Image: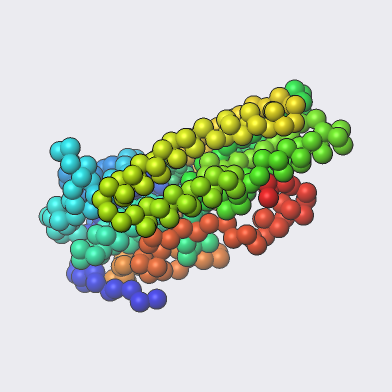
Amino acid sequence: VSVSHGIRRKMTINVGVLTAGGDTPGLNAALRGLGKSALYVYDLQLIGFYDGFRGLLHDRYIVLDESALSGILTIGGTILGTSRDKPAKMLVGGKIQDMRDAMVETYKKHHLDVLVCMGGGGTQKNAYSLAEKGLNILTLPKTIDNDIPNTDVTLGYDTALGIATEAVDRLHSTAHSHHRIIIVETMGHNAGWLALGAGVAGGADVILIPEIPYEVDKIANAILERSQSGKHFSIVAVSEGAMSKGNRQQEQQLLEDKKSAKDKKEKEQARQALENFYAAQSARTMRLSQELERLTGLESRVTILGYVQRGGTPSAKDRLLASELGGEAAALIVKGISGIMVAVNGEGTKAVELKSVVNKRKTVPLDHVWVQTARRVGTCLGD
Ligand code: F6P
């Protein structure tokens, strides 16, 4: 990859770090991996900015020394705090403003040589926007959604997958006892990795993901077939971004309308129509439940897993990954490398150009082995 080797060579290298976007289990382990490697092996000075890019703007920071980094390996969340602020479009003083120059000032004030940003797709993009302002940036891929391209997996996905799988497991006994349909909604934004992974691992009878628009009739038929074969309960794992075929077509049309809007008035109308569409969509899992009750005559209940998937202690796998990614970031910094994301590659890591992951989302390929596996064991995917 072509990466910049812009970090100044001098006795002490000053490193800033921040965590941004939705938190994930394993962030503290990554901070510890970076921090301890920085202190004990590479002799780097490390400061952490609070609450994502907002802390960088307001110069709110903590020196990440031995005591700050101790005892955090197994703790969920992030000791630095996080936010969804975007440097180039930040709400400051009641107005959306480009605050990147002010962030560059904080970077310079601390004589930073590099800023490490740990985050999901949005953070990769935001970090890149600061790289465009001349900062040396290095990122780590973290999100429970597992939707960052050019990395095998993202930090936090394994923990969330474990939590969602346990939920699917546990829902089986109550669905069985009550002869009910139970719909379990996972997070994952517009990627189906969590619902698919937990659905396959937990043996859901139906799995609905955004990549495969569904037809309610097909789901109802699959459930009725189970009933007829003596299985009077069904578990449906649905991703929060999954949509019916009809809704997906409607969304595509509204997106087209927005793109082709000619003037300001048309643009505003198209934007509003899209906003209304998404607002109406927020209750679609509840609607799916009602429709399935109507079509099957079975009782149906909904469990929305929500933030429980992001909370608490990281899995062993995420702790290992976080420690590795953090340590590798420190090693790359010492080599003077920036403008990259430290990606997961097989058993190890690799540096990928930051630009290559910006504005892209890794969704589930339709021929992915988990999709094939689900079909092979008779799981209905709604199509
Ligand atoms: O990106 C992680 C994630 O948990 C998504 O799965 C979910 O759609 C979103 O964040 C929720 O965002 P927020 O924390 O802003 O409510």
Residue 63 in picture, x, y percent from top left: 23, 47
Seen in the image, is 137 located left or right of residue 220?
A: left
Which of the four quarters of the rendered structure image does ligand 1 lie in?
top left
* Residue plotted at (74% across, 47% down): 379
Residue 298 occupies which quadrant of the picture? top right
The answer to whether residue 361 shows anywhere in this view is yes
Instruction: Write the residue at 43% across / 55% down.
Output: 256
Q: Nearer the viewer, residue 34 or 89?
A: 89
Q: Where is the N terminus found, in terms of image quarters?
A: bottom left
Residue 161 to residue 2: above or below: above
> Residue at 87% across / 36% down in the picture?
229
Q: Return the x and y of residue 74 as percentages of the image width and height.
A: 47, 41
Is residue 193 visible from the viewing direction of this image? no
In the image shown, does 193 or 315 lie closer to the viewer?
193
Q: Nearer the viewer, residue 323 or 148?
A: 148
Which residue in the rendered view is the most extreme toward the right? 229
How many callouts does the rendering have?
A: 0
Camera-nearest residue between 76 and 66: 76
Picture quadrant of residue 8: bottom left
Task: Name the side, left or right, on which 20 lies relative to 141.
Answer: left
Residue 149, position as x, y percentages in the image: 47, 62
Where in the figure is residue 188, as x and y percent of width and height?
51, 46
**Residue that protrudes farthest toward the top in the picture:** 178
Q: Is residue 330 left or right of residue 180?
A: left
The structure residue drawn at horizontal position 51% and vertical position 32%, both measured from the top left corner, is: 283
